[in-house]
Amino acid sequence: MRPTTVSASLLLLGTALAVPEVQVVPRFPGTCTGYPSINLGSGDRALPFQIIADQADNPTANLLTLYPHDTTLNGAPITYLAVNRCTECAAANTILQCENGLVTSWGYESPDIRISTAGLPWSGEGYTAGIYRHVIDGVDQGHNYWGAQNRTTWGFKVADDGAPEHYMVRLMGLEGEPTEAAWEPEFLGFVRVIQPHTP
Ligand SMILES: *[C@@H]1O[C@H](CO)[C@@H](O)[C@H](O)[C@H]1NC(C)=O
């Protein structure tokens, strides 16, 4: 009986750590209205914001800022989302903005940030990022989550491109995209949108 008891508590532990099952509700899709920052000036504009790992199965990633990391895949330049693996290393301070429903880097001209299976190409193929709320048993869980196509669960994996000091991060469950870059995650988590420096 003893081994059964042990594996039962391991199962319970696994359940406790798992990313929760949530109903994902889009917030003002196609606009910047759902972003948690003040609207300066006219038009559909929200600025600035940051995205942080949240409720990840590996808690060492939680609350750390995600940032775009440039690399090459099969000789072609790509950019994917990354988060540092050590809490002591310098915190990434990447700041994003939303304008006319599209997310770009804050502070300089950049193409739209779009989400794809491979991670986060700056342009080209991919889905427009958006804000979502999480609802469990009819109760809004607070906070604004980042995702696309009604998906907000992200996969994390130690980078295998010569930059093991960070995790690669990609949105899970997207359909209709090339799969050659769709690596298997080591753990799952959400990505939360915050105003800068207020995790
Ligand atoms: C996302 O969910 C909403 C309902 O909450 C639905 O209206 C919309 O069509 C869905 N979008 C996609 C891409 O599945």
Image: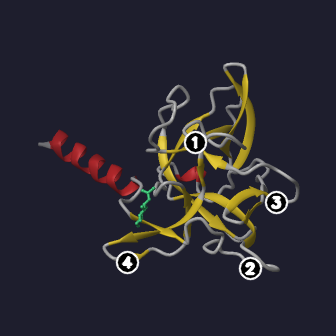
Amino acid at the residue labelled 3: Trp
Q: CA distance from mark 2 to mark 3?
A: 14 Å
Give the spatial CA distance, label 3 vs label 4: 33 Å
Question: Does the beta carbon of the residue at mark 3 sit less than 8 Å from ligand 1?
Answer: no
Whether tag 1 and tag 2 are in contact, CB under 8 A, the answer is: no
Which label belongs to residue 116?
1
Picture quadrant where residue 65 is located: bottom right
Q: Earlier in the sequence, mark 2 or mark 3?
A: 2
Q: Earlier in the sequence, mark 4 or mark 1?
A: 1
Q: Is residue 70 above or below residue 84?
A: above
Q: Mark 3 touching mark 1, by CB under 8 A?
A: no
Check residue 139 in the rendering and tell me which mark sits there, or answer none.
Answer: 4
Q: CA distance from mark 1 to mark 2?
A: 28 Å
Q: Amino acid at mark 4?
A: Val
Residue of label 2: 38
Q: Earlier in the sequence, mark 1 or mark 2?
A: 2
37 shown above or below 109? below
Residues under numbered marks 2 and 3 in contact, where contact means CB atoms less than 8 Å apart? no
Secondary structure beneath dot 4 equals strand
Are there few (<14), some (14-19), or many (20+) residues within 10 Å of tag 2? few
The residue type indicated by label 2 comes to Ile
Mark 3 highlights which residue? Answer: 106
Q: Residues within 10 Å of mark 4 (few under 14, many from 20)?
A: few
Q: Which of the marked residues, 3 or 4, is nearer the chain's N terminus?
A: 3
